[in-house]
Image: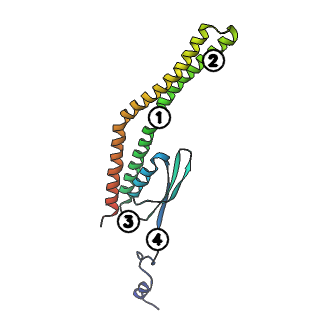
Amino acid sequence: MTSASSVSAVRPARDATPEGFAAYEYSSVKAPRDLEPLYIDAYRNFGWEAERDGMKVGTDVTLRLRRPRINVSRRELGELERSTLRALESIAALQRSCVVMPLVVSGLIGLLGCALLFVSVMGMTTGGVTLAPMIIGIGGLMLWLIAYGVFVSLQRRRVRATAPEIDRLHDVVFDNGARAAALIHQP
């Protein structure tokens, strides 16, 4: 019969791991294609590595991430990671708003121009070539040109309005990354 002390000497300790053993955590994250480098850099601060290039679907990229299991305060690290993800999503939403709102307004102006051109063409086919349908058609073409100018103007205005908030959110991402890196690499 063997004693308890001899059994524990033969059995490896609970914390001991075999040589070459690696335990990884895996995750996947959807990121806008134009913000892919920012997402990769932000997640790198949390110990994540991009396993391979993300799968590109439409305007989004799915990043496949992995990291070695970390023996730190998982709750604090998770809170920092969630805060960073919220900031990254807010950056993406603000950048989308710099295109979507001007596109909608200029699109409506362009549609109004199309309607005027339609009225002009219908006026010429039913009433002949007269001055009124031609003026209406010129008005439609002018609205097309105005739509482009409105798009450019609104986009510039929206970029200026959102720039301070985007900069603040970048600071949140960088600060959380620095705190997470310090937490992971603490002795």
Q: Position of residue 88 (x, y in %)?
A: 42, 46
The residue singled out by tag 3 in the image is 71
Mark 4, Cα crowd under 10 Å, few <14 / some 14-19 / many 20+, is few
Mark 2, Cα crowd under 10 Å, few <14 / some 14-19 / many 20+, is some
Q: In the image, what residue occupies the spot 47% across and 65% down? A: 24
Q: In the image, what residue occupies the spot 54% across and 23% down? A: 110
Name the secondary structure under disc 3. Answer: loop
**Amino acid, disc 2:** Phe
**Amino acid, disc 1:** Val
**Amino acid, disc 3:** Asn
Horizontally, residue 33 falls left or right of residue 125, namely: left
The residue singled out by tag 4 in the image is 22
The residue singled out by tag 1 in the image is 99
Name the secondary structure under disc 2. Answer: helix
The residue singled out by tag 2 in the image is 118
Q: CA distance from mark 4 to mark 1?
A: 45 Å
Horizontally, residue 6 falls left or right of residue 144, namely: left
Q: In the image, what residue occupies the spot 33% across and 42% down? A: 168
**Amino acid, disc 4:** Ala
> What label does residue 52 carry, if any?
none
Relative to 102, does residue 130 appear above or below in the rendering?
above
Q: CA distance from mark 2 to mark 3?
A: 68 Å
Taking depth in this image into account, of 46 and 113 the one nearest to the observer is: 113
Please tell me which of labels 4 and 1 falls first in the chain.
4
Q: CA distance from mark 1 to mark 2?
A: 28 Å
